[in-house]
Image (cartoon, grey):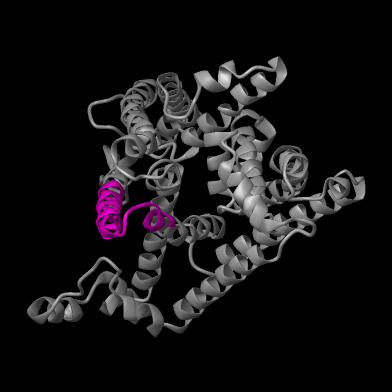
Amino acid sequence: MRSFVNLFRVPEIRNKILLTISLLMAYRVGFHVFIPGVDHAKLISYLDQDEGGGFAFGIMNALSGGAIGSCSLFTLGVMPYISASIIFSLLVKVVPQLEALSKEGQAGQKIINRWTRYATVPICLIQGVFLLNGPLADAAYTSEVIDAALFESVLYKVFVLLTLTTGTLIVMWIGEQITEYGVGNGVSLIIMAGILSQMPTMLLGLLNSVDPGEGVQSIVTLLVLYMLIVLGIVFVTKGQRRIPIQQGKQMRGRRVYGGQRHYLPLKVNQAGVMPIIFASFLFVVPALLDSITGGGFFSRAMAWGGFWYVLIYSALIFVFSFFWTALMFQPKEIADNLKEYGGFVPGLRPGVRTAEFLEQVMFRVTLAGATFLAIIAVLPQMLSSNVPNMPPAMAMFLGGTSVLIVVGVLLDLVDKVNSMLLMRRYDGLGDTGGTGWAKRGKRGKRTSGDAAQGVAR
């Protein structure tokens, strides 16, 4: 509690937190600015009854902050910006010019960020066209959500595309302002806010779908399941495989420098949520094949929760986990850097042997991380089939992409807040601060940093 109060005791941190909260509230206000010509109540009812596009639609809805069914100004959310960022993350590893630019430090990263923003606009238009020709077109021609004559107007479609693109650019600007002047990563916080905003609606829907006597029991069961899932995700997300690194000793005059021992941390979940996103978007292919062939064989074979769905989905997660890790983790480059700066792994020769060892270790770590991601990804199917009165939407919220994003963003936010507190010589959020002799000893101890500040004064 004392550490939480310290957040508002420092004016700079307090201003950052208040600015972040204000911008997130402004983001949520945009969901009440609707696209003209849409009957929103009928649209939501239509999308609830429509089962086409199933899981891929759910992933897109999660990345957009649950806004696809709202037809608001922020319908696309930050999804186009995320798509552009993923594309440039891949291009940086395969295009030599972009890779050289990324190694130029902050100046090169600013150029790549500017190109990412430019690429967001055409991606907005493409995703807006898919939205017009998908849910909105079906709603216009099969229900009374949109007037069919109005929807056939080219001018109306152009206006909708421009509205969706403008909304995405506004959300992207809000995210950049939070990143620069607020606390944490702005885009990640926006996605998390959109996901958490759906939780009250899901809980109310669950209460309305069960008997009055079972409502409290169902909510308690969901809370216990959610806490267990979150604890498991935190345990794996913070898990590391530490490789010892020994620095070589150097003689300079009469002094010996170096010789310290530290660790190279390899995260268990190195790929993050990217494999689940890639695998989920590939499940759009069965719907496209059915639209081409005019049948429903592929959609029935890949039905949500079916055997082939779980098998192929898990296999794709393993493939994309190794693919993403192979792109982002370069053992040869790490081994060369260690050799250049006089570091080595004890018992291994610097260079090729060290690179082979890092590659072997990373393969085993990635295998464990991919297994963890596959379990989290198929968790919604397990929950909806084994937990009584579990709606599919709530099951997808408890497992899969949503819970991974929420937990990952919160862990990153806590780390950044702790670093800001420690820079100002306050205890972090996870510290108790100590009492009695421990506290006086900590306060009375003069560290090397204090001595350096005293000399500077």
Between residue 203 and residue 371, name the one nearer to us.
203
Can residue 109 be seen by looking at this rendering? no
Residue, x 85% and y 54% (percent of image)?
Answer: 159
- Image coordinates of residue 440 in percent, x first then y, are 14, 82
- Image coordinates of residue 64 in percent, x first then y, are 59, 50
Residue 166, located in which quarter of the rendered image?
A: bottom right
User: In the rendered structure, which segment of residues is drawn in magenta?
Assistant: 205-231
- Image coordinates of residue 340 in percent, x first then y, are 43, 35
> Eyeballing the image, is 235 above or below 324?
below
Query: As drawn, which residue projects farthest toward the left?
Result: 437
- Image coordinates of residue 379 in percent, x first then y, are 35, 37
Residue 175: say if magenta: no
Residue 34, located in which quarter of the rendered image?
A: bottom right
Q: Is residue 340 left or right of residue 292?
A: left
Residue, x 50% and y 22% (percent of image)?
Answer: 302
Residue 225: say if magenta: yes
Q: Is residue 298 left or right of residue 422?
A: right
Residue 451, located in which quarter of the rendered image?
A: bottom left
> Eyeballing the image, is 312 above or below 383?
above
Residue, x 77% and y 50% (percent of image)?
Answer: 146
Can residue 367 be seen by looking at this rendering? yes
Report the number of discs: 0
Q: Please identify the quadrant where the N terminus is shown.
A: bottom left
